[in-house]
Image: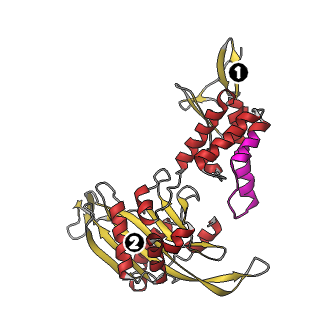
């Protein structure tokens, strides 16, 4: 899915759309015991309650693509004959009405998920979307010819509230009061199938994790039985390690600075172009950047080869995962410096009297601990 398609489905999750009919789920305690089940109609709820439920499902379709939202791809063999894919299809095709399929999904999630000392709530909802057909001018939509059926699952910790002072109107006094348990934002969830090219792709599911550094491996193994995607921090560390391991002495300040600037430039141009498809960027692109900066062809090609080993065949790299495009950070064992990426080109290295230095222009506007200071002329 691309961001535009995700946004289109997110807009469905609104009481005004009337798209969602039922909410199913179960409340699980910290001992993995089901305390209660949910089977409720949104149409019969107060608007505030229905909005709260739909907001939880919207969270599953939020965050950066490739970071909080990660594509899970099923193999052809899985789609044809696997139990895990068959279960997801039963849930989708029944509009979640298949009680035994819901129970099986709950069981799989309960076996795989734990939030330390917190209880949690598993929620499910589904929708049948009459997909408008894009007209030839690509700016307007015609009558629907396709119905996209999908469901969303989210898992939300349920936390005990702490005692707080609350105002008692009858006694006209503030007294200690404990609120009911509170449902937190989803920690993980998924949508199946994905919405691509105005229709369903049953070979893919969109997985959500609130923390991009935590991929919830047990959950993915239990529900999808596919290879665990590399988290965003893992991608960044793997890219950095591959670059330093293969370039060795050629991994200079100037080379890394140029790689950062070139990747950031590609990302900026892509965003300004308004192209909905994600930016295509791979190890070969980085290899070309390295060669243009004077890195030996052998080292640059070794980097590309090692990327294939560590990221997989023909790896497409998410630029925003492999470098931090929002800041340029320099660190020594004693000092850390963060530079606005727009001015990273002003930072340079120099050897003075046999000692290595990182130089940053400091003509004016210099402050130390919030205090404006001046730097005297020689």
Q: Which residue is mark 2?
A: 123
Question: How far apart are the alpha carbons under marks 1 and 2?
Answer: 58 Å
- Res 274 quadrant in image: bottom right
Determine which quarter of the picture holds residue 145: bottom right
State yes or no: residue 267 in magenta.
yes
Q: Residues within 10 Å of mark 2 (few under 14, many from 20)?
A: many
Indicate yes or no whether the magenta region holds residue 80.
no
Comes first in the chain, label 1 or label 2: 2
Is 368 situated above or below 204? above
Where does residue 61 sit, x and y in percent of width and height?
A: 53, 66
Magenta segment: 262-289
State the residue at coordinates (37%, 69%): 122
Identify the residue at horizontal 64%, vertical 65% (top origin).
2
Closer to the camera in the image, 305 or 249: 305
Residue 40 left/right relative to 197: left
View extreme (top): residue: 353
Q: Is residue 291 visible?
A: yes
Is the residue 114 above or below the residue 232 in the image? Answer: below
Quadrant, the C terminus: top right
Left or right: 103, with 176 as reference point: right
Q: Is residue 46 left or right of residue 144?
A: left
Q: Which residue is mark 1?
A: 350
Residue 333 is left or right of residue 123, and the answer is right
């Amino acid at each position: 899915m691309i961001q535009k398609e995700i946004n289109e489905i997110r807009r469905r999750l609104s009481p005004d759309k009337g798209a969602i009919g039922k909410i199913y789920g179960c409340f699980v305690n910290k001992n993995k015991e089901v305390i209660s089940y949910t089977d409720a109609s949104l149409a019969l709820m107060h608007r505030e309650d229905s909005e709260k439920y739909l907001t939880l499902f919207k969270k599953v379709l939020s965050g950066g693509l490739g970071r909080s939202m990660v594509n899970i791809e099923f193999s052809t063999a899985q789609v044809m004959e696997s139990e895990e894919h068959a279960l997801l299809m039963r849930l989708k095709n029944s509009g979640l009405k298949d009680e035994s399929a819901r129970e099986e999904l709950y069981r799989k999630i309960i076996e795989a998920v734990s939030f330390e000392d917190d209880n949690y709530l598993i929620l499910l909802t589904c929708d049948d979307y009459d997909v408008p057909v894009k007209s030839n001018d690509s700016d307007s939509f015609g009558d629907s010819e396709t119905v996209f059926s999908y469901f969303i699952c989210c898992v939300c910790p349920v936390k005990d509230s702490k005692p707080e002072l609350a105002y008692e109107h009858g006694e006209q006094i503030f007294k200690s009061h404990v609120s009911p348990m509170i449902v937190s934002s989803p920690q993980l969830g998924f949508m199946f199938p994905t919405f691509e090219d105005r229709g369903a792709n049953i070979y893919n599911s969109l997985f959500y994790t609130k923390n991009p550094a935590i991929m919830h491996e047990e959950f993915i193994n239990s529900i999808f039985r596919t290879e665990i995607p590399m988290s965003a921090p893992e991608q960044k560390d793997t890219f950095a390690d591959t670059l330093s391991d293969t370039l060795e002495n050629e991994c200079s300040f100037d080379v890394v600075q140029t790689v950062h600037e070139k990747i950031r430039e590609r990302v900026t141009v892509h965003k300004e172009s308004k192209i909905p498809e994600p930016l295509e960027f791979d190890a070969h692109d980085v290899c070309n950047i390295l060669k243009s900066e004077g890195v030996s062809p052998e080292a640059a090609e070794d980097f590309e080869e090692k990327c294939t080993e560590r990221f997989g065949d023909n790896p497409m790299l998410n630029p925003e995962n492999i470098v931090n495009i929002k800041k340029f950070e320099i660190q020594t064992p004693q000092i850390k410096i963060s530079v606005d990426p727009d001015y990273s080109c002003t930072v340079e290295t120099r050897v003075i009297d046999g000692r290595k230095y990182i130089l940053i222009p400091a003509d004016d506007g210099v402050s130390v601990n919030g205090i404006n200071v001046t730097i005297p002329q020689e």
